[in-house]
Amino acid sequence: MGCGAKRTASEAASPAQMDITAPESPLASPGASPPSLASAPPEVDMSPARIGQLDRPDRLVHLFHGLSALDEGHAHNDVRVVQFGDSHTAADVGTATLRHLMQARFGDGGRGFVSVGKPWKSYAQDGIRGGMTNEFEGSRIRIKGDRAAGDGLYGLLGVDISSDAASARAWTRIAQPASRLELDYLQAPRGGSFDVFIDGSLAGRVSTKAGETAAGYTAFDTTDAPHEVEVKTVGDGDVRLFGMALDRAQAGVVVDALGINGAQIFTPLRSGEDHFAEQLRHRAPDLVILAYGTNEALDPRLGDAEYERGLVELLGRVARAAPSASCLLLGPPDLARRASKEQPYVCWPRIGEIVAIQRKVATAAGCAFYDQLEAMGGPGTIIAWVNEPHDARAKSDFVHLTRFGYAQLATSLGTDILHAYDEWRAEIGLPPTNAARTWGIATR
């Protein structure tokens, strides 16, 4: 199959080998019997239900209700967007663009969930810089053979930092204002204590010792300003930190960038489901975005049936943990490969097949779908982006984008969501808002 030819969704999927359900159906109920995907339409009717590259914006109604409350000035809670993904998300360039775009219209509810310290060497996000001493160690689920090693308790992001030593230090500098800092950690029978410093002053001591193993949360209120947060272990037991949520007193939009380099949809599935559900439930998202597909497209061992099953299972976990939240599958951007160093880069047809499977599953699961591949310009676009002489939108690995490319795609996504939201307001009879039609801006 050439780069210009795509398999249809029905050709890409293997319906006989997977089950999926609609949003109010047994997808959120593990004990029920979901209908087969074979009963779904073989093709997705895009014409009446698409805005830009956003398929089925009607699946975002819960998000739209939250945005409407902010728009009309009577919201008491933030509208939280949680995006799980791979290195595209971990870079927090596209998610930062989406964050700024949404907050510019609906208000800044806070920076969101971030790691404490530096769980891996390249970890850095928009306005977030951290570090830690050698006594702290970052950890995530490890794969040995075909099985996951570890206890599956790694927090919302899926990566933690831990230490059983005394005086281990981890710190995070936060450029954006925050007035409430909530630390997320593991409580356990052998749990230790740590001190929390905000801008150099001791804010309190947290004990993680408990009769049973479970997540724990401790919040600190402070002035609404940029801060430096540091934790320092006491040395009386094991301390495992999952991260912290940075919020503000005012209601607004919050966008969490929960990406891990090299992740696939199977990465969050390797966490224990109860732990994953508790973490996501505590975050109380209004929209969950799953932004995977690049690493799956590069995995020669991964077949369609296995990928479909994993995607359905992850959507099921999300639905059971946050049944009222809207969901959106964010298709991967374009990529290119070459057979050898002497050969030129060519487009990679597998990325289009992954997109087709995602679109099919999203439709059956009651989720919206956003096609970043088409938003870029279609298969092969990344080759042109890499070769742009100025402000190139893609990096020379032909996989990752530059800040210009990520910003363009996130602007396209955000403006299509805002366009859909304004259309929804009109359809249900709500008056127009005073906000500028930010969905009408150019992307380049």
Image (cartoon, rainbow, N blue to C red):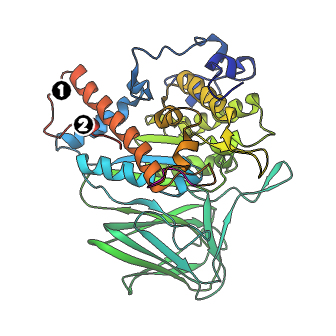
Q: CA distance from mark 1 to mark 2?
A: 9 Å
Tell me residue 29's x, y (percent).
59, 29
Residue position for label 1: 430
Magenta segment: does it hold 394? yes
Taking depth in this image into account, of 31 and 308 the one nearest to the observer is 308
Q: Residues within 10 Å of mark 2 (few under 14, many from 20)?
A: some
Q: Position of residue 316 (x, y in %)?
A: 60, 34
What's the mark number on residue 196?
none
Residue type highlighted by circle 1: Leu
64 relative to 31 in the view: left or right: left
Q: Quadrant of the N terminus?
A: top right
Whether 141 is drawn above or below 419: the answer is below
Rendered-image quadrant of the C terminus? top left
Is 75 situated above or below 331? below
Query: Which badge, 1 or 2, comes first in the chain's sequence?
Result: 2
Label 2 element class: helix
Query: Looking at the picture, how far across and down is residue 228, in whole percent?
Result: 39, 78
Q: Are dots 1 and 2 in contact, CB under 8 Å? A: yes
Give the overall secondary structure of the magenta segment.
Answer: loop
Residue at x 14%, y 28% (from the top left corner): 431
Identify the residue at horizontal 70%, vertical 31% (top origin). Answer: 309
What residue is rendered at 63% in x and 73% in y? 162
Name the amino acid type tagged 2: Ser
Residue designated by label 2: 68
Task: Give the residues in magenta.
Answer: 390-395
Q: In the rendered image, which quarter is residue 185 located in?
A: bottom right
Q: Is residue 265 visible?
A: no
210 within the magenta span: no
